Image (cartoon, rainbow, N blue to C red):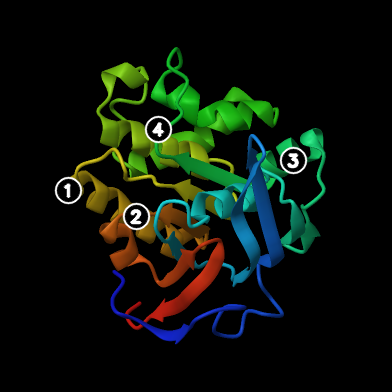
Amino acid sequence: MGGTHTIEQTAGVTPGTWENGALIRVRELSRIYYQGEIEVHALRGTDLDIGEGEFTALAGPSGSGKTTLLNVIGALDRPTSGRVEVAGRDITGLDKGQAAEFRLNTVGFIFQAYNLVPVLSAYENAEFTLLLRGMSATERRALVEPLMERVGLVDMMHRKPHELSGGQQQRAAIVRALATSPRIVLADEPTANLDSETSGSLLDLMLELNAELGTTFVFSTHDPAVIERARRLVELLDGRVHRDSVSAVA
């Protein structure tokens, strides 16, 4: 579990020694949205490195840019300017097809609203990305069922989302995110709709999976429970990295 965050810096590239071997590298990243004729600067020249296997929380007030940053790293959104590299690949200018391929093969997503397909069972939701990869039913089962067992859903995996609690739906979403063995899992406010006990249980599960599988987890969050457990805390303010600290407790 995380603890007090130390080894701080207030801006620029991350603390530590990830500069040359970062899994995620963000440079001078800007994202401008337009509300009518008004420019909204969601990101303002952000620099950030995230290393392989990190368990990192992006925190900050609403409008600080954390969800935008997560979406750009996951190729769900394109920056106005700047550069993003993931596993040595420049993803900044990917077209729609390339971005879809990148997401399918490199990134798993966990969303606040779960984003499960309501007409599919928990198992069918979890195997969906594997189906898109062209895997056989046997191959899909070999990957999904052990994860369902791991998250405690094996007895409920054939239920539809409306037959599951919020915590169970988020467990199914975690399996879906991990089934493809992604290098990175991006989680956007994944505990926002859950009670504190369920949130804590799921976060501890993700910490265990992070340790066992070596998967890099990056969260955007307001949740103190996420911040407490994060091994690294990146605080954003007005679209920039304001403070960056590493936990003193593993």
Mark before the other along the chain sequence, 2 or 4:
4
Frontmost residue, 152 versus 206: 206
Please name the amino acid that badge 3 sits on.
Answer: Ala
- Do the residues under discs 1 and 3 have CB atoms within 8 angstroms? no
Percent x, y of residue 199? 26, 48
Frontmost residue, 224 versus 146: 224
Position above or below: 18 against 228: below
Label at residue 99: 3
Label at residue 113: 4
Please name the amino acid that badge 1 sits on.
Answer: Glu
Percent x, y of residue 221? 39, 54
Q: Which residue is mark 1?
A: 197
Q: Residue at x 82, y 39 (%)?
A: 95
Q: Label 4, label 3: how many angstroms apart (C-alpha)? A: 22 Å
Q: Label 2, label 1: how many angstroms apart (C-alpha)? A: 16 Å
Please name the amino acid that badge 2 sits on.
Answer: His
- Does 197 sit left or right of 21 as displayed? left
Frontmost residue, 225 versus 127: 225
Q: Which residue is mark 2?
A: 222
Q: Residue at x 48, y 65 (%)?
A: 236
